[in-house]
Amino acid sequence: MAILINKNTRVLVQGITGRSGALQTQLMQQAGTKIVAGVTPNKGGQVVSGVPVYNYVAEAKAAHDFDAVISFVPPLAAKDSSFEAMDSGISLLVLTTEGIPTHDVMQIVAYAKCKGAHLIGPGCSGVIAPGVCKVGSHPVRFFMPGRVGVVSKSGALSYEIGKTLTDSGVGQSTVVGIGGGPIWGFTQKDAIALYNNDPDTDVIVLLGEIGGTQEEDAAAYIKQYVKKPVVALIVGRNAPEGKSLGHAGAIVSGGMGTAASKMNALINAGAIFVNDPVELCSQVKKYLR
Amino acid sequence: MDLFEYEGKRLLREHGIPTPKSSLVYSADEQAPLQFPFVLKAQVLTGGRGKAGGIKVCSTQQEYKEHAKAILGMHIKGQPVYALLAEEMASPSNEIYLSVTVKNGRPLFIASAMGGVDIEEVAKSQPDKILTLELDIFYGLHKYQLNRLAAFLPMLEAEDLKSIANKLFSAFCALDAKLIEINPLGVINGKAIALDAKVTLDDDAEKPQKALFAALREDREKLNCYSEPVKEDNTITFVQLEGNIGLISDGAGTGMLALDMVYNAGGHVASFCELGGITNADVMHLAMEKTFFPGNTVKSLLIVLIGGFNRMDDMANGITAYMKAHKLDIPVFTRMCGTMEEEGERIMRENGLATYRDLTQTVQLSVSAAKEV
């Protein structure tokens, strides 16, 4: 078992006829994901990678069972299409789109809370359970099945750490990329809570970044509830104050969101704090024994 | 996009929030726009105007000419003053702080009776003087929240305050704003009037707010020589730092990781360049151009690539094209892995460039090379 997805997960792809939607659909199928339908308005009737395309989610729902949606729609289509996806009663929406207007993101996040759906993103790489299922854009070559649960803001950083672990023979139960912010649906704390109860995860890896207070929130949760070892890496310690290094959420201003504040909170919560991928890997191996 | 006070106030007025009678002044040669006395305020996108001498009361024609000329020649925190807002005098009995902003993915409404000062300072020294209300993006202020607000700010007539608060939230949504701050909101005979306005619009909402953005830009052209930085049509982030190692990465998270690893290894980064979501050979070429801008301090180049969406053959073509065109004799250390890595490695090799797969090793090589120079 993994968190959020499993071998029975059935997926609908929004924006399936777009360049990135079509490519990622194929890559997800190669990773073992059961993709049952796709939606692109006005493209109903087409077939992409053997997957039937519909104009509306409700039309797809009438013909197929699915419990997760991954969305590759353009920024201005994200709000309405996310409402449409969540209205179909799904439990998981992976919203990969970046650059969605802030007010639209606030509405999507609030709607997901009301509907009780897990919203991963926006602007995220999504979820992979290596060897089982992938509802995201992770390259499968960097991952292998195992018992380490990873949550990362950055997609590329989760590939980097996945590669480091996999190269040294350490597999992963699930890897989640939640996006670079500054607004998130699913948080690091949410992922840690699920890993804590997942019988197939023995060690949790938290990949954080400077900016915001997510890592501090995760630390408070770890301190109170988590008995499994948590190995944490925070990147951006040497970033200049007041400047974003590519993720809108990764910015330190007025002394808030610093690496030091996150490090102190995590160490205080009993997490194992590491400085680079090599150290991370050796600590994970130590605690897997 | 940050707005000038006069732009923000015009938007507040359009949403039914009272502001003082005012007029814009672009030149000291213009006739006095209002009856004396009035106040002249420098229009700049920064705080601390008053301390810098950018706000003056004018009681006579001579004072007006002198002040207008002086303020229009000023730079405030490095910003030239292109326009003045002439505004009728207001003598409020109280100064209130009101704002609505985005916090933790929700609208946050903030109020304080201690307006007119730096609210961050009040928040630190006297947190009980500040009321914060987390709002529902779909509903705005609930009745109980309006009642709490009215009880917290008794110097204002309750109905007037509730109406202003609702209008503030409506404007926040209608404008796709990230921040609307009224500091201070003056109280005159129990009624509220916005004496300053700070509005930040959401750049990601430029398309749905096309008319608003276009009107603001057109209007700004009147501020002679005021020009907006041109928005580049790519997803590259480039930040100049102070060391001698150029860093290019194809992800923000891995870029920040490599940055930290360089410092851990005793190196210093000259510039941080992240390619962002859309990558191809041209974007990589552009990243090289940005890194080697005239006057750069790069002595060694570290390129960290982990291909997901992007292809390593594309990246290799971008790097080698730049190296050939510019006959660059700076050592380049490229960590390349992921989609099409064999092809990328071959292209690099044929152009006499080494590639590595291990990140730690690549970082160390780039740091050593920078130290030798």
Image (cartoon, coloured by chain):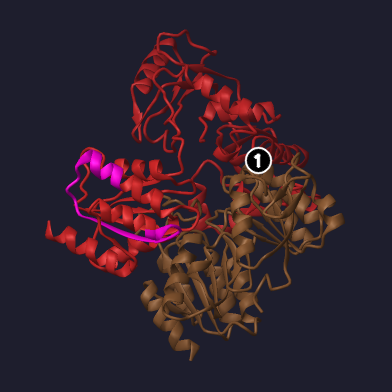
Horizontal arrangement in the rendering, residue A116 relative to residue B244 (left or right):
right
Q: Position of residue A69 (x, y in %)?
A: 71, 58
**Along the line of sight, the residue nearer the viewer: A107 or B90:** A107
Q: Is residue B120 above or below residue B91?
A: below
Q: Which residues are magenta?
A: B320-342
Q: Is residue B104 visible?
A: no
Residue B92, given in percent of the width and then of the height, sits at 60, 33
Q: Residue at x 42, y 33 (%)?
A: B50
Residue ID at (81%, 56%): A88
Provide the residue designation for mark 1: A76
- Chain identity of mark 1: A
Q: Quadrant of residue A27?
A: bottom right
> Chain A: what color?
brown
**Chain painted red:** B
Residue A79 is at least partly visible in this image: yes
| Callout count | 1
